[in-house]
Each structure stands twice: as C-alpha cells, then as structure tokens.
Image: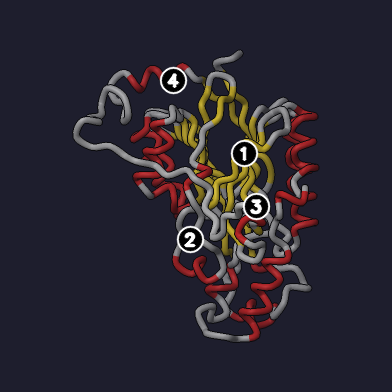
Amino acid sequence: MENTLKIAMAQITPVLLNKVETLKKVENAITEAGKQGCELVVFGEALVPGYPFWLALTGGAEWNTTVNKELHATYVRNAIQIEEGELDAICALAKKYGIAVYLGIMERAKNRGGHSIYASLVYIDAEGDIKSVHRKLQPTYDERLTWAPGDGNGLQVHPLKKFTVGGLNCWENWMPLPRTALYGLGENLHIAVWPGSDHNTKDITRFIARESRSFVVSVSSLMAKKDFPKDTPHLEQILEKTPDVLANGGSCIAGPDGEWIVEPVLHDEGLIIQTIDFDRVYEERQNFDPVGHYSRPDVTKLTVNRERQSTVYYKD
C-alpha cells in the first residue's frame, strides 16, 4: 500500500473574514477525511479567513478610503499568527487521524512585524508537525493591495509514503522557475491551491502534470453572493456589484500523462476523494523528466534563495 495515496480535496466555503468559524469548518473536514481513511487533505488558497473578493467590487485601488481601510483592518485581524498557536488544533487533528494537511491561510507574520499579511500554504505532516509555510511569492493584480509578497523559504517538498509532495499558491503555478525549484527537489505530487473557479484549474492542472510527469492536485474554494456574512463591513456596497457566483470550485486531479483522473468539480461543497498510484510517475518519466534525463544543467541552471526574509536582523 506504500504505492498508493488516498487524497481528499476539501472544496468548501469560508466564513468570510471570520477565522474562528472558518477554522471550525477546516477541522470538520479533516475529521471527516480522517474517518474515511484519507492520508492527505488539501484546502484552497487563503481559505482562512477567505479571499479578498471585495477589492474588485468596491474600488479597491481608491486611495485612503474608509471602506478599504476598514475591510483591510478586519482582514488583518482575522489572519492567522502561527507563532501564537492558532493552528494547534489543526495539528492535533492531523496527528489524531494520521493525515497530512495542506492548508491555505492568510498569515500575519510575526517576523515581519505582525501587521502585513501573506497568502501562505502550510504543510502539516501526519505527526501533526508544521513542516513548511510557503508565503506566496507574487500576489496577483488587486491582491497586491492587501497581500505582501513572500519569499523562497517555503519552496520545500516533503516525503509522503512513496511520494514527494510540494505546493504553490494560485498564479504561482504559472511561474516556470518556482515550479522548476520544486521539480529539482524531486516533487512528483504537486499541490496547486486556488481561491476558486475552473477557469483557473481546467488548463494549468493538466499542463503542469504533463510538463512535470507528476500527479497534480488542484483544490479550490467556493463563494457565492449569498455566502457573505451579514456582519461583513460595508456589505451593502460590496453586494451592489457582486455576481451570484464568485468562485465555483473546479477542484480536480490530473495524472502524470496530463489526462484527467478527476475532472473539475463545480459548485459541490464537501470532500472529493481519490486514490492515486505512485507507479504511474515512473512510467511517464521514461520519456521525459524535466530535471533529469531531459535537462541540460551545463547550459541552463536555476539558483534559488530559500532564506526567510525579514527587514531587521537582531544581534543581541
């Protein structure tokens, strides 16, 4: 059974701007996945406490407005500070059920002063230990109005049975060099997390699988107009321009040949469970291996800085 891995894609809706209630949904999903014998459960990008959809709906680029400031402040207050133990309950559940977890959070990073937030992908192993926190390298378009750019420290992979698993956030998956950094570490199970919608997952999932000859698991969240909590700041202004559906899911899995194992699942909330077989990786690496026999490091080579970045270094 070391060759196979049972994966749960947790396609769920956050309780937007409420980390406590969203973490409860995460805990319920981990418990359900654990009871079903899953060995890895994956959640979408920035799930806790949700994606900043309001930026595109409220004139997010307007300077010095009360709406933007108050929504941002609420967002920061509901971001996760890992150093304060806010993921301890998640780690305890991972250990209880012997299940690894990839969780997308907004991280309020203590080593960067504790006031800016990062779209971070946290990997927790089956022993309940946090093994990596990957801060998204480059926020996309309007995300830059509320998220800070991360660093290379989280470009890590992890052993999971016979697999080597790594992950990236959303449009990072379109960036060739971060993908290559993970390939070079031996990645053969790639996790791609998204805020939601098959327009993101339907092409890139199969492309990465075919390029890397790896399994690719893309996991998205859901969000509809009806899902905005009633206590959301400036709710009336947000809803004026909100479509009925902001994120339709689109979680899916592609095999190492680039073909679908699970096609994008739309609108359904809950766990999507699939078992994959490691041997398929070796089969497809026979004719192409992007950092092995089908590479020329004497001609092109990548250098990666994995130092955790901080503005101030103290020498006491």
**Quarter of the image where one finds residue 36:** top right
Distance between the alpha carbons at the discs numbered 3 and 2: 34 Å
Q: Which residue is mark 1?
A: 123
Which is more N-terminal, label 4 or label 1? Answer: 1
* Front label number (2 vs 4): 2
Vertically, is 302 above or below 223? above
Q: Is label 3 in a helix, a strand or a loop?
A: loop
Which is more N-terminal, label 4 or label 2? Answer: 2
Residues at badges 1 and 3 in contact (C-beta under 8 Å)?
Answer: no
Q: Is label 2 in a helix, a strand or a loop?
A: loop
> What's under tag 4, amino acid-wise?
Arg
Residues at badges 1 and 4 in contact (C-beta under 8 Å)?
Answer: no
> What's under tag 3, amino acid-wise?
Asp
Q: Residue at x 73, y 73 (%)?
A: 232
Q: Give whichever of 171, 293 is nearer the camera.
A: 293
Q: Which residue is mark 2?
A: 139
Q: Which mark is residue 55?
A: none
* Front label number (1 vs 3): 3
Q: Which mark is residue 280?
A: 4
> What's under tag 1, amino acid-wise?
Tyr
Distance between the alpha carbons at the discs numbered 4 and 3: 52 Å
Distance between the alpha carbons at the discs numbered 1 and 2: 20 Å
Say if residue 226 shows up in the picture.
Answer: no
Vertically, is 77 above or below 165? below
Q: Residue at x 71, y 71 (%)?
A: 74
Residues at badges 4 and 3 in contact (C-beta under 8 Å)?
Answer: no
Query: Which residue sits furthest front?
Result: 316
Distance between the alpha carbons at the discs numbered 2 and 4: 33 Å
